[in-house]
Image: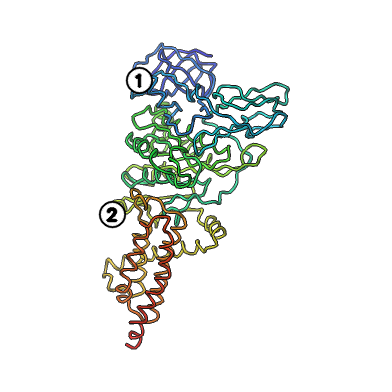
Amino acid sequence: MNQGKIIKVSGPLVVASGMQEANIQDICRVGNLGLIGEIIEMRRDEASIQVYEETSGIGPGEPVVTTGSPLSVELGPGIMSQMFDGIQRPLDTFMEATQSDFLVRGTEVPILNRSTKWQFIPSKKVGDFVTAGDILGSVQETKVVEHRIMLPYGKKGKLVSIKEGEFTVEDIIYEVELEDGTIFKGTMVQKWPVRKGRPFNRKLSPVEPMITGQRVIDTFFPVTKGGAAAVPGPFGAGKTVVQHQIAKFSNVDIVVYVGCGERGNEMTDVLNEFPELIDPNTGESIMERTILIANTSNMPVAAREASIYTGITIAEYFRDMGYSVAIMADSTSRWAEALREMSGRLEEMPGDEGYPAYLGSRIAEYYERAGRVEVLGSQGREGTITAIGAVSPPGGDISEPVTQNTLRIVKVFWGLDAQLAQKRHFPSINWLNSYSLYVDEIGEYINNKYGIEWADKVVRAMNILQKESELDEIVRLVGIESLSDRDRVTMNAAKMIREDYLQQNAFDNVDTFTSFRKQTAMLNNILFFEEKAMEALRLGAYFREIMSGTVNLRDRIARSKFIPEERVEEIEALHEEIQTTIRHILASGGESNVSH
């Protein structure tokens, strides 16, 4: 341990002298209160330390002691369903220990509960050769998550003892004779430095779609398990609700939700809502598979910078068990602001809009830790991390540095539109400027798995929306009556896609989530209606007749979104009705039109 002395305090930045034996990224105890800080710069014997707690009242001359280890997270049973702050302090335990609703400085609490006993069931036996990443046994942590105990990185050898029974996270449950002859005594808990990505065997191309239950995302701008997506949008456009929806309903095993510099009431919403919500995939509460990291806007700014790394490291740990994990960061703009503040205090050369020159590389580092990988271990398991980051550009200007640097790395862009939000069209993802570079792979995957021409249907629907955008200009200038009947059918089909399909109510019990089967049935009906209406025009029917003869049918297509999942057959049955209704219109009026 190296001890120094504070010589300067500037907000969350503390400079200490006499630190010549300390290293960059070492964790320190700062001042008489013992605040947690991390060394981010060394100049001769002076260390610049970013402090993860409020520094008011700390003054020059107070001691600084380094621990000699980097900022790390504890990984083991008891981590699931928890709510941590940005440096992984459990907020419930913290509140009990301090008897306060606020973060009391200098308080130390154990990250994982040391007294809880977990039932450990071994999956390896004495004499087995084990290597880093191998699963030695498991603990049923929640009703839906089996916590797999892995051999830590850098260890391999022969298993000389393994116990079954109830143990705390600190009890020794197995012993491995390493290749150098020493005995490694293992517990259920591992530590890992947050700024270093956990290793894996190799990265694989992501192909399987992450079904979110949000129609505009799953249809037009899908993200794969192991992909990365950005949700930029102005204030009030619905970024947080989109992320909440994905956290609630996506078909992943584990969700890590990082509230990074957002308003406290948004995290309160999560805390109130999530325990009551039932996961459609497991039938249990969503909190059974969720970990929350809260570093809201009124919490120390330096810890905000660490919170994203804490979240992604926890996600990597569950990925290594072979799970698919989704990590939501809300929002990376606030994280970038924390970087900018610390960079300014370090007197570094500012880049674009005052952000540090290394902003782009830090954002890339974070998103690069997502992906589909073959994890360590002899079992050849696969795990995925899907990273979804909200970006809050000031004034909704997506040309600013954080958005631009993010879009250079991610392959999916869900651009939220203030005008759509004002029209109460939610999710307010603009279908004309958003994109997904996974469309082809996912289209192929769905075509092969379900035997449907999904990719072609998506292209057709998008073409209808783009045609509507072109026709809009003419309608504004000379009115809708000036359009041909065919164009008016296109405009009507686009309106059906927009209002009956893309618009979705997150607060309606049925419409909040749409399974893939229901999505295909709904989109099929709209496209089939457009196809049959165009056919009727060719055979001599008038647009006016088609519209007046299908009022009831179109109303039923519109109300499909409110039909519960267990009655999807009713939506599929509309397909036959569309054909019959259009045929009836032709029989009663089409022929007379031809004679005209």
Q: Position of residue 426 (x, y in %)?
A: 34, 52
For residue 207, side relative to residue 159 (left or right): left
Q: Is residue 185 above or below residue 513?
A: above
Q: Position of residue 329 (x, y in %)?
A: 43, 39
Question: Mark 2 belongs to which amino acid?
Answer: Lys
Q: Which residue in the protein does label 1 denote? A: 99
Residue at 55% x, 56% y: name it. Answer: 445
- Disc sitting over residue 63 in the figure: none
Q: Nearer the viewer, residue 300 or 91?
A: 91
Q: Residues within 10 Å of mark 2 (few under 14, many from 20)?
A: few
Furthest-bottom residue in this view: 595
In the rendered structure, are the residues bearing label 1 and label 2 in contact, judged by CB atoms less than 8 Å apart? no
Q: Which residue in the protein does label 2 denote? A: 423
Q: Is residue 375 above or below residue 544?
A: above
Q: Position of residue 49 (x, y in %)?
A: 45, 22
Question: Mark 1 belongs to which amino acid?
Answer: Gln
Q: Residues within 10 Å of mark 1 (few under 14, many from 20)?
A: few
Q: Is residue 578 above or below residue 241?
A: below
Q: Nearer the viewer, residue 19 or 590?
A: 590
Q: Could you say whether the residue bearing mark 1 is in a helix, strand or loop?
A: loop
